[in-house]
Image (cartoon, helix red, strand yellow):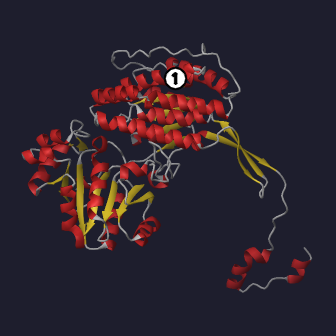
């Protein structure tokens, strides 16, 4: 790297986690202090070359990918939040971090990053400054690292405002990231966390003070970010519906749906929430889902699930992202259900009166029967219109014309074909989408991006513009079709005299 930064700058110390205290009048001083340290560290770091930026990215990746760290953070996250399971969180932390590292090391983010000789354009990447990142309780370890890697790729600093529920986990991974930066002579203050307790006031103060806000989590935080006066990137809610048509390999589809649905107990916004099956293979598809580990609930069991999974119209915090045996007992299901991987409930309605049509964050998958592909497509669109519009959907089929029709007609950013949705939507080794834990949903969910979040969103770009041969078409080249429509006769003499 071109600039050596003394490791004494921003020395990392274990971050204390104060006991919870009563609400008090907001004091902006701690946020201001964090921002001062971040700006000082970023000013130094902004002078590194591409090698230096990539070294920082590798260091942050290793802080979580390192096997003992991945396990420690997974155990801490489950202990603190009660969401998901340790084994899958280890896989998630290592897989997402490894895939993101692959993507980041393949791109340029310092100096000249693109040249177009035909247009006389050269693009130079510049840092944005200090990134404010709001992260969710569902991924209190993985999401902060994912965002920090993207931020430092662009030679930025980052300050993380975690979900209060996941604060202890996020504080620990921030300490580990800071230690890894110091090991290679970079300022630890490139990565910081807001002091505990994180409140709406402190989060909003960070949003106003930083140079870019990136929010993964509640839609309330997304709205606050967009109204903060600072450039912001927010992502939308998921509620993924997938389709199984009569051409699909039913057992392969069932296995992929199972693997995706049960991963980390359905904490991912990319987890399937509904499956729409065409009538011609409905019974066979249900049988395939059962062979793959699903339990099909009776109407009476479905009603008990509805009563217990929602409390006063909101998801029951004590039942989301729990293990299948825990849910089976809570739902009053028979003993054989406790040995299954997840639970199917049949539904025929969509909307607020039909809560199973929405996102459940639980090992419950809603099943719809559709007369044919056209009806299935309409049902998927109806589900998305109710919740999750813009996010994504999937189809299991061997007819690519149908997949292309969904992509052309549905208001979603991503349509996945024959995927375990959770493992393809946020980037995969067999998916061309970039690895991320933040997926934009376009204007359909009032998001500023309609793609997976990447390091390119953390860059300012300077355009160097040089002269090229004149590219000036004639008026007829541009207006000709319109003139023909309205009967306009071109004044050729006047045109010739120009």
Viewport quadrant of the C terminus:
bottom right
Residue 308, image x and y in percent?
16, 43
Evaluate whether residue 402 shows in this view.
Answer: yes
Q: Residue at x 51, y 16 (%)?
A: 12
Q: Quadrant of residue 22?
A: top left
- Please give the residue where the numbered disc 1 appears in the rendered image: 180
Residue 229, image x and y in percent?
56, 37
Viewer-closest of 345 and 146: 146
Q: Residue at x 49, y 52 (%)?
A: 433
Q: Residue at x 44, y 61 (%)?
A: 411
Q: Residue at x 44, y 40 (%)?
A: 96
Residue 354, image x and y in percent?
23, 56
Tell which residue pokes out farthest to the right in this image.
497
Viewer-closest of 438 and 180: 180
Q: Provide the secondary structure element on which disc 1 rests.
A: helix
Evaluate whether residue 216 shows in this view.
Answer: no
Residue 339, image x and y in percent?
14, 45
Q: Is residue 341 above or below residue 285?
A: above
Q: Is residue 125 above or below residue 351?
A: above
């Amino acid at each position: 790297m071109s600039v050596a930064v003394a490791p004494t700058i921003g020395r990392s110390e274990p971050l204390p986690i104060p006991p919870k205290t009563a609400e008090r009048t907001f004091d902006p001083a701690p946020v201001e202090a964090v921002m001062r340290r971040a700006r000082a560290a970023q000013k130094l770091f902004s002078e590194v070359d591409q090698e230096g930026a990539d070294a920082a990215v590798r260091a942050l990746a290793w802080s979580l990918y390192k096997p003992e760290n991945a396990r420690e953070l997974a155990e801490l996250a489950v202990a603190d939040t009660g969401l998901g399971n340790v084994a899958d969180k280890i896989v998630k932390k290592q897989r997402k971090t490894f895939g993101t590292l692959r993507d980041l090391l393949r791109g340029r983010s310092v100096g000249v990053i693109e040249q177009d000789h035909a247009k006389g354009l050269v693009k130079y990447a510049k840092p944005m400054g200090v990134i404010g990142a709001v992260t969710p309780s569902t991924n209190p370890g993985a999401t902060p690292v994912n965002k920090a890697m993207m931020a430092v790729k662009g030679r930025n600093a980052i300050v993380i405002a975690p979900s209060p529920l996941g604060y202890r986990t996020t504080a620990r991974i921030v300490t580990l990231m800071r230690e890894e930066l110091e090991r290679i002579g970079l300022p630890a203050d490139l990565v910081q966390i807001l002091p505990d307790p994180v409140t709406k006031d402190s989060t909003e103060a960070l949003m106003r003070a930083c140079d870019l806000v990136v929010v993964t989590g509640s839609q309330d935080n997304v709205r606050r970010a967009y109204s903060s006066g600072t450039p912001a990137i927010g992502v939308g809610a998921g509620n993924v519906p997938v389709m199984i048509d009569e051409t699909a390999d039913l057992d392969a589809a069932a296995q992929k749906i199972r693997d995706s649905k049960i991963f980390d107990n359905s904490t991912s916004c990319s987890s399937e929430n509904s499956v729409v099956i065409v009538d011609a293979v409905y019974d066979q598809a249900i049988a395939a889902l059962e062979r793959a580990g699903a339990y099909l609930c009776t109407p009476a069991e479905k009603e008990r699930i509805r009563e217990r999974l929602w409390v006063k119209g909101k998801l029951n915090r004590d039942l989301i992202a729990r293990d299948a045996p825990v849910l089976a007992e809570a739902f009053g299901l028979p003993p054989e259900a406790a040995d299954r991987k997840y639970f199917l409930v049949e539904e025929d309605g969509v909307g607020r009166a039909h809560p199973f049509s929405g996102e459940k964050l639980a090992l419950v998958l809603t099943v719809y029967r559709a007369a044919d592909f056209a009806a299935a497509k309409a049902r998927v669109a109806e589900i998305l219109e109710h919740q999750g519009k813009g996010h994504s959907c999937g189809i299991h089929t061997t007819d690519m014309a149908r997949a292309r029709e969904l992509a052309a007609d549905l208001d979603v950013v991503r349509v996945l074909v024959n995927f375990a949705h959770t493992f393809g939507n946020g980037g995969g080794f067999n998916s061309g989408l970039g690895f991320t834990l933040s997926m934009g949903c376009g204007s359909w969910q009032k998001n500023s991006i309609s793609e997976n979040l990447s390091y390119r969103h953390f860059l300012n770009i300077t355009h160097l513009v040089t002269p090229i041969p004149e590219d000036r078409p004639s008026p007829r080249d541009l207006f000709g079709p319109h003139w023909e429509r309205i009967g306009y006769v071109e004044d050729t003499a006047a045109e010739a005299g120009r």
